[in-house]
Amino acid sequence: MRLDFLQMPEDKMNEAMYALERCESDHGLTFTTLEKDRAVAVLPVRKEHLNLYNMVYGGYMFNLMDVVAGVANICGGNVGPTVSGNIEFISSTKDQKELRCIGTVRKSGRTFTYIDVEILGENEKLLSKGSFIYYNK
């Protein structure tokens, strides 16, 4: 996937492309949508993602949301680190074969970007939602 819709200086674009490639290779994600202020990724649930209750580890869910929020931030034209994140577990991930994570920029300012994230399971069931703040470099 490309970020051709962004108007970024070359150094920032290189940083953004590197971050996107690392997200896919390091986290096993496939980004299905990259558009202005929005990123969508799919994660096939593997055995190593599960806790002893056969649900996806909460920490892994947080990481997934943070990664997708970071890419949504890039899709908004910004790069920078996470300042804070909050997650709510709404429904069980038990027996889910695939998770879809959607990050949407709610507000982007000169210094901070606010991003909402949702994780959906099969049949579009809302499993978790969160909010993240990123510092814009």
Image (spheres, rainbow, N blue to C red):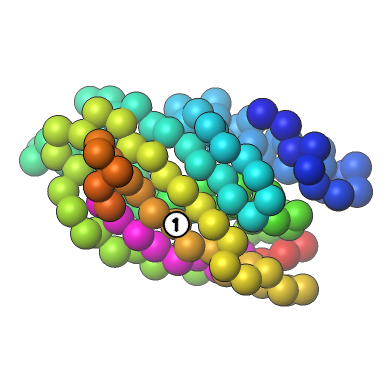
Q: Amino acid at mark 1?
A: Val
> From this viewpoint, which residue is outermost toward the right?
9
Residue occupying image coordinates x 39% and y 62%: 130
Looking at the picture, tell me which residue is in the foreground, 74 or 107. 107
Looking at the picture, tell me which residue is in the foreground, 125 or 20. 125
Q: Position of residue 120 (x, y in %)?
A: 32, 45
Residue at which label 1 appears: 117
Q: Quadrant of residue 83?
A: bottom right
Q: From the viewer's perspective, is 3 left or right of 20?
A: right
Residue occupying image coordinates x 54% and y 26%: 25
Main SS type for the magenta part? strand
> From this viewpoint, which residue is outermost toward the left?
53
Q: Which residues are the magenta region?
A: 127-134
Q: Which quadrant is the C terminus positioned in?
A: bottom right
Q: Position of residue 47 (x, y in %)?
A: 22, 25
Q: From the viewer's perspective, is 69 left or right of 15?
A: left
Q: Position of residue 62 (x, y in %)?
A: 37, 53
Q: Is residue 120 above or below residue 29?
A: below
Q: Position of residue 38 (x, y in %)?
A: 59, 50
Q: Quadrant of residue 90?
A: bottom left
Residue occupying image coordinates x 64% and y 36%: 20
Q: Is residue 108 visible?
A: yes
